[in-house]
Image: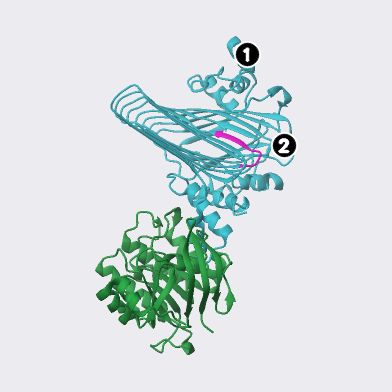
Amino acid sequence: MKHVEKALTKKAAHGPDVDITKYEMGPGSMDAIDDLGKAPRDLAEKMGEVGVVTDEGARDGSLLIVNNAVGHCSLRVSDGMELMPLDRALEKYDGLKDHMWKLVEPDKDKFTATAYTEKATGYFIRIKEGHHIKNPIQTCMMIGKDRSIQNLHNIIVVEKGASCEIITGCATGNQAGDSLHIGISEFYVKEGGSLTYSMIHSWGSGTVVRPRTGVKLEKNARFTNNYVILHPVGTMQSAPVVHLDGEGASCRLNTVCLAHKGSDVDTGGTVYLNAPDTSAEIISRSITKGGRMVARGRLVGNVEKVRAHLECRSIVLDDGGVTLAIPELETKVADVEMTHEAAVGKVERDKVEYLMSRGLTEEQAVGMIIRGFLVGGIRGLPEELERDIDEAIEQANLGD
Amino acid sequence: MPMLEIKGLHAEAGGREILKGVDLKVKKGETAVLFGPNGSGKSTLLAAIMGYSHCKVTAGSILFDGTDITHLPVDERARMGIGMMMQRPPNVMGVKLGDLVRAAAGGDDVGIKAAADFRLERMLDRDVNVGFSGGEIKRSEILQLTAQSPRFVLLDEPESGVDLESIDLIGTKVKDLLYRRTNCGRRTDGCQAVSALVITHTGQILDYIGADVGYIMQEGAIRCSGRPTDLLNDIREKGYRDCISCRMVVPS
């Protein structure tokens, strides 16, 4: 415990440093919302912005956290899955000894240390062996209080041969723009299991976002991570670490990002390929519209016969922004296939005019090219997410 | 009033003057053919008419249907009824051909439904021009134009780089594009026909669409005019140099 307390002031490896003491822990209780369809209007609107639907018919499970309180938790399908607040799971499963703080080190930095020493709220999702959950499970993380900390810890276990898709929407209320989101996530996908985890965000222009994610994949397990951030944010730094520990395991980390003026976005991921025939793809597509955008990616091939590819592509729309692509490949063995490509450029004039020659306005042409750039070529994006992305692109007035 | 009237047009591309005083008229319903050696400025002239920014007009004017369009943006020209088939259109990653065809038709599905006639039904989900063969690019350009339904068509070497089978399809579709507004078989002013300015080296496309008048371009200006078949024969026999020295007729 002492070494964790020491880490409470430890700067993170990447991203601007944050003075946590200027925030206070957000409220830990709220009135429960039994039916998301009856959620207050402003809350429902925010949920809609980040892909969380109030009509629960389209979801096999829903969970809502506002600040540090679970306000809603419901299951439409009870066979084969569990969805519950983390504290209940800790009670039920003897502290989740095999899953708590196994993939993220508590003393990694001040954010993990805070989540460890203060009592974090969160959820536990378990998909039981052999079960395929048909519709997505949705979780929503909302910050409703200014200058507060949202302190989360989420655990997902997909058991042998099971599969599910999770959509997580994160947002801040209109009055809570200057707040801090800490989110520890630990995902376990067992043999032959499959997890698709999509995050869509609508933070405030001053929000500080520091997720810390660890993922462990067993034999032939699959994991797709879609990280979508198209609205303004203060500073965001995210770098999930995936361990491909079982033979034939594969993962894909997709990032779709638009860095607005004043936003500082640092995204990426690390994948350790620890078993033969594992494969990984890190794909990042970003647009800088006056903001700072760092796209990182690190692939580490620790054994022979692994395949990995890393791709960072960025378009700079306005002067004044910064784009930095940092691809890294590392291995000590000979028989691996690891590649990367990075490209930073602009929206090419000849392409815009080509579309304009078909009668599209300049704004429509630029919008079409940017949408294509952001989502075209990314495999594994749920269709629904593409629609949300389309809306966000439309709102962002990229042709201006 | 001519459909297109170009007066004393000078234009630069890549920092070099390419067009050095072009004068040209295309009447309503007329198909004009542009011959000329490589580098004579034919493609630059078409780019200037469409309004592509890589081609910078420094003097002169372009009138379309009586309106001065010399400095209008590309999309306004397109909406006025000018459509262009590029020789080498750019790859547009992430934009599906089907979406572009639909947008070209103003959101209508008319082009999508026609895709099979162009042997492109399987290409609608592909990124525009990415990995397309020579013939596929040409067919896709004409499908887009058909969806767009322009009043004035600029065709830059519609038959280059395609196999014989594709040439037949392309020729037929270009013909449909030019004649679709009339049932009278021959295009005249009264038939509201589509006008065209066509660049060709081989003249193959003329087997399908015919042409009313031909021009030879040399060193950035129109140097000669005449019946397209006569000009083509002269060029074949004598080459551009002799052909031009023989006539030296600048059209009025």
Which mark is on residue B173? none
What is the chain identity of the residue bearing mark 2? Answer: A
Q: Residue placed at 32% from the left, 76% from the top? A: B243
- Which chain is drawn using green? B
Which quadrant is the N terminus of chain A positioned in? top right
Reading the image, the residue beneath label 1 is: A5
Where is B49 relative to A3, above or below? below
Q: Can residue A5 be seen in this view?
A: yes
Q: Residue placed at 47% from the left, 20% from the top? A: A98
Q: Residue placed at 40% from the left, 57% from the top? A: B125
Foreground residue, B185 or A273? B185
Which mark is on residue A176? 2
Amino acid type of the residue tagged 2 in the rendering: Ala
Foreground residue, A222 or B52? B52
Which quadrant is the C terminus of chain A positioned in? bottom right
Q: Is residue A273 visible?
A: no
| Disc 1 with disc 2 on a shared chain | yes
Q: Position of residue B13 (x, y in %)?
A: 48, 59
**What range of the chain is rendered magenta?**
A260-266
Helix, strand or loop under label 1: helix
Q: Is residue A113 left or right of residue B37?
A: right
Chain A rendering hue: cyan
